[in-house]
Image: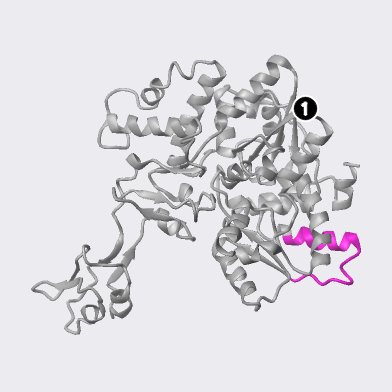
Amino acid sequence: MRKFDTKVQHLKYKVLREVAKQAWDDTLLDNLLEIPKKIVPGNMPTMRCCVYKERAILGDRVRLAMGGDKENPNVIEVIETACDECPMGGYEVTNSCRGCLAHRCEDVCPRGAISFDHNHVAHIDKSKCVDCGACAKVCPYTAIVNRKRPCENACKIKAIYMNENKAAAINNDKCISCGACVYQCPFGAIMDKSYILDVIDIIKKSENNQKYKVYAVVAPSISSQFRYAKLGQVISGLKKLGFHAVVEAALGADMVAWAESEELAEKGFLTSSCCPAFVDYIEKFFPDLKEFVSHNLSPMATIAKYIKEQDAPCKIVFIGPCTAKKAEVQKEAVRQYVDVAMTFEELQALFDSKDLEITELDEDVLDNASYFGRIFARCGGLADAVAEGLKEHGLDKDFQLKALSCDGIEACRTALMKKSKNVLDANFIEGMACIGGCIGGAGCLTHGEKNKAEVDKYGKEAYEKTITDAISMLK
């Protein structure tokens, strides 16, 4: 079975695997220049115009695999040398233009950018065009289209723009690190920084001096990934890598649902705090609504805080589908609890860097959370868990939950806009920046509707059937 959705993901994985392999052996700095040659051997290019450019881009991928630009606070970066195959985009006249006599496109153009050839076919002067779209709106044949780059289409908050070199660039003041551009770029020119070297360093130091244990906190969406193996084998693989124990972030989700339901009943209105990209979106685009964001830490940070309080000293590595978690870990309120965040893509690279064939391992057990904690992974799951929390608290009789689950950042925008104008018919907004929720995260190995069914199946397998049962183990 294929491990990745796209060949871009596979290329990214190969770089991560080679970087990790040499880091385990302490030979990374001695062999950095050999990694591009190992991935593209010989003198024939496999994707680009020449092998030298291909290796130069791979060198940039290696840099990002090692943590990227330390001066850039964003966890998403553009490899400018790889961003040269997409057309600049903007409005273009297609061959659907019939050469009509009305010339409505010319009449509405505010900059005189429309001209016609001897067949009355329209042409757009890009040096004059300001991409207002007026011409496209009036064309009776819809012959004028707006050709945006894939990254621009993917970014629903308009944080992507084209720089003076006609390469994509990211406005850090707008970017929420959701990674939509990372997954959609067909050339892999936009990537999330990897902190895989930090993970390896933490594990190696724990093995050498035994002064602390290393915990892996895994997101519930892991149930929809690594489809070529069984979940229990993935857990065994994590322990083979050197993790002392594997804990479900879903247990943190149970803890959040329990506390958040109480907070909601007390305050009367809340937006969720589980998705870091959604919280960042509120802070940057709807700052007047910051007061309504739940004061609970995310499930990742909540369970990590508990572990560190119970078993200090220890280190926590979060593993999930989310690029924004890498940004969340840098926040002051979280970094004291979570040491590193990595994606499922990076975990696959770690397995293979140690030549671990997880399908050959025995199955270990992962059973910390309830059904409700596990379904946080898909859109609507958080709202269902808050409803259950209200019920188990006995608050559902006095407080009627009216939840709105937002599937993707555009749905989040609509809900927040309505709230800002006091016309929202809901008292709880579940905000998920990725389509489908966490199962649609940029760091997933696979994406698709099947992932939702896998998460629900995983939830039903939980030994703990209520939130109360799950969190009672913590007392």
Q: Which residue is mark 1?
A: 313
Question: In percent of the image, x 87 and y 63: which residue is there?
Answer: 391
Q: Could you say where residue 149 lies in the image, as x and y percent from the top left?
A: 36, 56
* Residue toward you, 291 or 400: 291
For the N terminus, the quadrant is top right
Q: In this image, 154 relative to 96: left or right?
A: right
* Residue toward you, 418 or 409: 418
Q: Is residue 19 above or below residue 286?
A: above
Q: In this image, 129 relative to 213: left or right?
A: left
Question: In percent of the image, x 30 and y 80: which residue is there?
Answer: 138
Residue 120 in view of the camera: yes
Q: Could you say where residue 323 lies in the image, as x and y percent from the top left?
A: 56, 45
Q: Is residue 311 above or below residue 464?
A: above
Please state the extent of the stretch shown in magenta in the rendering. Answer: 383-402
In magenta stretch: residue 393: yes
Outermost residue toward the left in this view: 118
For the C terminus, the quadrant is top right
* Residue toward you, 288 or 198: 288
Q: Is residue 132 above or below residue 340?
A: below
Q: Could you say where residue 318 lies in the image, as x and y percent from the top left?
A: 66, 38
Q: Residues within 10 Å of mark 1 (few under 14, many from 20)?
A: few
Q: Is residue 220 above or below residue 397?
A: above
Residue 219 in view of the camera: no
In magenta stretch: residue 392: yes
